[in-house]
Image: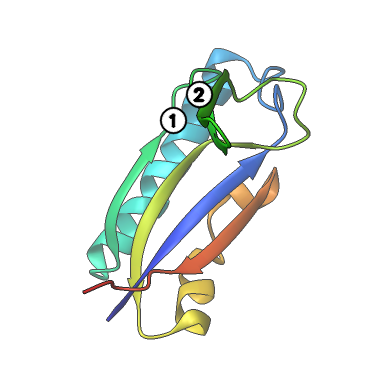
Amino acid sequence: MTQFLVIPRDTPGQFDHLSPDEMQQLIGRYGAWSQRLAEKDQMVLGHKLVDGVGRVARGTDDGMSVTDGPFTEAKEVIGGFWLIEASDLDGAVEAISDCPHLENGSLEVREIQVMA
């Protein structure tokens, strides 16, 4: 099986309107989706990233420049990741086709290139 990185992208604050009960229901739906993939031996790993905390590093002529980020004024933020397994890219797309995130954001699917 080939591994794929699934990157959820969403709009900052898109879940702010949800009540605590609605948020718990949504979290439950994500959990159920992850469990379905785990039962098919397709889920390798998945984690949510901490909101608004991080750094952006860029190479410069002097070495490296580091700034705070990501910024909330961004149009899209990466909210976490899943590492899944599938036979090919089409299989990976099929595996994410019922992910609850597709109702509110987008998912980027990238094949992992194994480096020796």
Q: Which residue is mark 2?
A: 55
Quarter occupied by the C terminus: bottom left
Q: Residue at x 35, y 57 (%)?
A: 83
> Is 37 on the left-hand or right-hand side of 58?
left
Residue shown at 39%/52% (left/top)? 82
What residue is disc 1 on? 49
Residue occupying the point 53% across, 35% down: 79
Q: Looking at the picture, does residue 75 appear above or below residue 54?
A: below
Which of the pair 60/51 is nearer the observer?
60
Determine whether the residue tagged by mark 1 lies in a helix, strand or loop.
loop
Tell me if mark 1 has few (under 14), some (14-19) or many (20+) residues whose alpha carbon lies within 10 angstroms of its own.
few
- In this orientation, which residue lies closer to the viewer: 95 or 9? 9
The amino acid pointed to by label 1 is Leu
Residue type, label 2: Arg
N-term-proximal mark, 1 vs 2: 1
Residue 52 position, x and y percent, is: 56, 18
Q: Residue furthest front?
A: 62
Query: How many discs mark residues in the rendered view?
Result: 2
Residue 15 in which image quadrant: top right
Residue 2 image-quadrant placement: bottom left
Give the CA separation, mark 1 to mark 2.
Answer: 13 Å
Q: Residue at x 60, y 55 (%)?
A: 107
Q: Nearer the viewer, mark 1 or mark 2?
A: 2
Task: Check the picture and name the quadrant holding the N terminus.
Answer: bottom left
Q: Residues within 10 Å of mark 2 (few under 14, many from 20)?
A: few
The one nearer the camera, 64 or 47, is 64
Looking at the picture, how far across and down is residue 64, in whole percent?
50, 30
| Residue 103 spot, x, y in % from top left | 68, 48
Looking at the image, which is closer to me, 65 or 22?
65
